[in-house]
Amino acid sequence: MAALNRGARGLTLIELVLALGLFALLTVGVVQLIDGSLTVIDRAGTERELMLAEGSALEWLEADFASLAGGDAADLVAGWLRMDVDGDGIAGRTVPLVRLVRRASPRDLERLGGLESVVDTDNPDLDARRLLERVGRAPLVEVLYGLQPSLTGKPSEGAAGRRGDLQLVRAERLEQGPGRSFFDVPLAKAGTLLEDVLLSGEGDVLAERVLRFEVQFAGELTSLERGWNPGTQLGESLRQWDARGLSRVDPELSDWNARSAALPATPGPPVLPRRVRIELELEPERVHRRRPRLAESAEIDAERLRFGRAERLPEAGTALLIGEEWVELLGAADDEGWAAVARAQRGTQRTLLRFGTPVQWGSPAVREVRLATAREEWRR
């Protein structure tokens, strides 16, 4: 009987504690593995969403420029103005506003409700889309691109904006002549124009958390053998464009609006570029959620900055947006968070960088569009 009891005895307290400890370690390991897998999946999902948003915005831009109207109907105005994004009362961020005229496709007319404008009065039963393809007399569509703060505010020159990220807005309308044209609004009133098109339903947000949106143009005299080098001299690429020479790009709003020697100085027939370079940079969700911040304020002449959570900074050579100034990270931060930077990059000015300002960065995406209006581009 005693032997039977010895064979049926249970676990001792020590054995039970050890078993529970091993089970707990195993559970923690499994939870960490699952959590890590979910984090990777979530990160991949957000990065994929960013790429899709970025790609969609670039596809809209590429399609609009590729469909520019030629001849006497052509028009393209691109200029720059300063916007107050960080709410300090100083318009220090340079952003573009692009307006163009393109030929409408059957899909454009269906979306904008303009199919009735091409109906054949002699044969009203003929499908309007087939008629458009047959006769080729497509109505014109005006398209507008600009940046607008995600939060409510007026980004026009001299007006204080609200703290918030920028969003890329695209608006379109069938050409209706003077009084109902995007081109009627002065460049300085770009903020009001963007607000109006969003409220009217003519505008859509193509991308959120936009860090940078730039457009450059190559004219007939622009040399691209050494890349895109913006300037105002012959052979250099252009940051601004006024197809009709009507002085619609105000140089007082930004140095980037300085007139180029490659463009006509007086009104005349429309002149279009032969190539367009589009650059768009968005902030990834993972950066947005885990933004480092400045751990100390920095004077205008400071060449080293102190970052909080410096381990979250990207690799050296990355361009960082701090407030309204772009800087380049020159090396890894030390144990106290100090890192060397190159100030006033990407055409921005040195500013007083305040304690707690978030640090943003992304990966720029670039598209180049050859315009069919330039005969030499057909041969390339």
Image: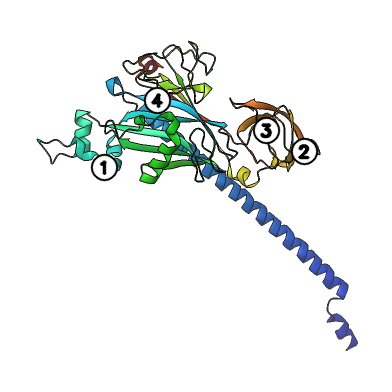
**Residues tagged 2 and 1 counted as in contact (Cβ below 8 A):** no
Foreground mark, 4 or 2? 4
* Residue under the point 27% across and 41% down: 110
Give the residue pinned by disc 4: 77
Label located before the other in sequence (4 or 2): 4
Disc 2/disc 1 C-alpha distance (Å): 57 Å
Amino acid on which disc 2 is placed: Gly
- Could you tell me which secondary element the residue under label 2 belongs to? loop
User: Mark 2 Cα within 10 Å, few/some/many (few <14, many 20+)?
Assistant: some
- Could you tell me which secondary element the residue under label 1 belongs to? loop
Q: Position of residue 330 (x, y in %)?
A: 71, 28
User: Which quadrant of the rendered structure holds the N terminus?
Assistant: bottom right
Give the residue pinned by disc 3: 352
Q: Nearer the viewer, residue 237 or 110?
A: 237
Foreground mark, 4 or 3? 3
User: Mark 3 Cα within 10 Å, few/some/many (few <14, many 20+)?
Assistant: some
Give the residue pinned by disc 1: 113
Residue 32 seen in the current view: yes
Colour pattern of the rendering? rainbow
Disc 4/disc 1 C-alpha distance (Å): 25 Å
Q: Can you say whether 21 is above or below 46 in the image?
A: below
Give the residue pinned by disc 2: 337
Q: Which quadrant would residue 23 be assigned to in this image?
A: bottom right
In the picture, measured across the screen, residue 36 lies left or right of residue 199, that is right
**Residues tagged 3 and 1 counted as in contact (Cβ below 8 A):** no
Label located before the other in sequence (4 or 3): 4
Disc 4/disc 2 C-alpha distance (Å): 44 Å
Amino acid on which disc 4 is placed: Val
Amino acid on which disc 1 is placed: Gly
User: Mark 1 Cα within 10 Å, few/some/many (few <14, many 20+)?
Assistant: few
| Furthest-bottom residue in this view | 1
Q: Can you say whether 364 is above or below 356 in the image?
A: above
